[in-house]
Amino acid sequence: MNLQPSEMTHEEFLEMFGPVFEHSPWIAERVWEHGVEFRHDTIAGMHQALCNEIRRAGRDEQLELLRAHPELAVQVGAGELTGHSRREQRGAGLDRCTESEYAEFQRLNQAYREKFGFPFIVAVKGYQRGQILEVFRTRLAHVEEEEFQAALHQVMRIGLFRLQEIFE
């Protein structure tokens, strides 16, 4: 990154930080509206600002943010995956599932979406397929509010990993 966030134009800022959260540029837009300062020139500062906007959002907006995420292991080659999601899922080996793993991901994805109304979200960086399936099974047992908060937390972790890439 050549420019610091506090030195960027509105357009540059949105181009750089709009994609951090899946199909949700409104988060970066709100950070801009509140004013980008030198404290946002670090990973921690930018992450805090972006996450504060998620926390300030209403429940409906938070739900839309969760629903903007792709399901795991079923769309790795699909056009609706962002470049970030495609790389992250490939990095976790989700594009190389065995038939039984793929079938289990499909079954869990369907059960999870039916129960919670949004896709299962986990920051897959550092995980392998088997570990992701284990986390998936565990979180499927959560109650609704517990899982809503867990999913938001995972979205924020994904955002942190993406910011680390941007700031490198």
Image: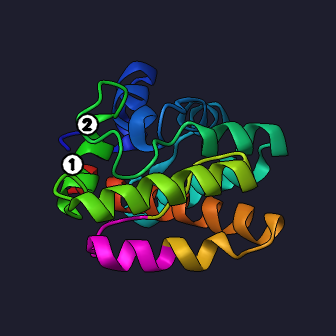
Its colouring scheme is rainbow
- Whether residue 58 is visible here, answered yes or no, is no
Tell me the element at label 1. helix
Disc 2 residue type? Gly
Q: Residue at x 77, y 44 (%)?
A: 57
Q: Which mark is residue 87?
A: 1
Q: Residue at x 64, y 49 (%)?
A: 113
- Mark 2–mark 1 distance (CA, rounded to whole Å): 6 Å
For disc 2, the marked residue is 83
Disc 1 residue type? Arg
Report which quarter residue 132 is drawn in. bottom left
C-beta proximity under 8 Å, tags 2 and 1 = yes
- The quadrant of the rendering that contains the C terminus is bottom left
Tell me the element at label 2. helix
- Give the percent coordinates (x, y) of residue 116: 73, 54
Q: Residue at x 50, y 42 (%)?
A: 69
- Give the percent coordinates (x, y) of residue 164: 29, 60
Above or below, 122 against 63 in this view is below
Q: Which residues are magenta?
A: 123-135
- Whether residue 143 is visible here, answered yes or no, is yes
Would you say 45 lies left or right of 116 here? left
Would you say 44 lies left or right of 64 here? left
